[in-house]
């Protein structure tokens, strides 16, 4: 009898797990529309940050907004297709040092905080972006 109860409990537990969908990073960022707004807010912050704003002078911001939105969407597990350059080619002509990289991450975190993105999803996204530092920084 005890064993049957245990099996029932396990079965119920598993079905309960399956029926409670896990929120993805993509969901927590607000889906595609949320990511596009996030990137817009991020680019505004970047343009106000004297540590890195000079690196973006002369850049096609409409293209950057579109590509960065696609890129973050893919990294967040969303149903997007990234149509831009790889990270090494995209940044080959930009003189980015580790302090610049950290400043951009700081702006991204501030933007996500301001938009109420849960810390767990922020950390999961940052963990996906961190290894790209080697392709972005000189
Ligand atoms: C993991 C971190 C980063 C990611 C995921 C990322 C992503 C991107 C993407 C998707 C593009 C557009 C590529 C294309 O047009 O095909 C881009 C361009 C650019 N990124 Fe980044 N980036 C990162 C870090 C940085 C940092 C730290 C800086 C400077 C502080 C920076 C400055 C730029 C600039 C200036 C461009 C425009 C280049 C141009 O169009 O001439 N990026 N980045």
Image: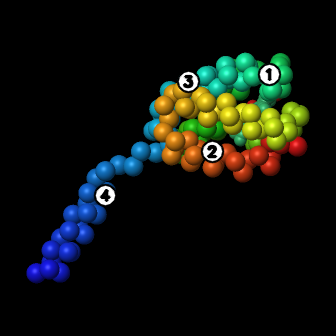
Residue at figure coordinates x 82%, y 41% from the top left: 98
Q: Circle 1 is placed at which residue position?
A: 50
Confirm or reject: label 1 Cβ below 8 Å from ligand 1: no
Q: Is residue 69 left or right of residue 87?
A: left
Q: Circle 3 is placed at which residue position?
A: 37
Query: How far, Cα to Cα, is label 1 from label 2?
Result: 23 Å
Q: Circle 2 is placed at which residue position?
A: 126
Q: Circle 4 is placed at which residue position?
A: 17
Whole-percent x, y for residue 5 in the image: 15, 74
Query: How far, Cα to Cα, is label 4 from label 2?
Result: 27 Å
- Number of callouts: 4
* Local secondary structure at mark 3: helix
Residue at figure coordinates x 61%, y 30% from the top left: 110
**Visible in this render: residue 44?**
yes
Query: How far, Cα to Cα, is label 3 from label 4?
Result: 32 Å
* Local secondary structure at mark 2: helix
Nearer the observer, disc 1 or disc 3?
1
Please state which of residues 37 and 101 is positioned toward the viewer in this rendering. 101
Nearer the observer, disc 4 or disc 2?
2
Residue at figure coordinates x 31%, y 50% from the top left: 20
**Visible in this render: residue 85?**
no
């Amino acid at each position: 009898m005890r064993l049957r109860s245990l099996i029932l409990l396990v079965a119920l537990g598993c079905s309960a797990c399956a029926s409670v969908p896990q929120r993805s990073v993509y969901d927590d960022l607000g889906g595609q529309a949320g990511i596009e707004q996030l990137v817009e807010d991020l680019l505004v912050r970047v343009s106000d940050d004297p540590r890195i704003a000079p690196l973006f002078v002369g850049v096609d911001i409409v293209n950057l907004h579109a590509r960065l939105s696609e890129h973050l969407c893919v990294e967040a597990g969303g149903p997007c297709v990234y149509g831009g350059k790889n990270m090494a080619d995209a940044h080959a002509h930009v003189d980015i040092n580790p302090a610049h990289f950290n400043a951009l991450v700081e702006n991204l975190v501030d933007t996500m905080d301001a938009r109420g993105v849960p810390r767990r999803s922020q950390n999961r996204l940052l963990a996906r972006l961190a290894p790209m530092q080697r392709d972005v920084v000189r």
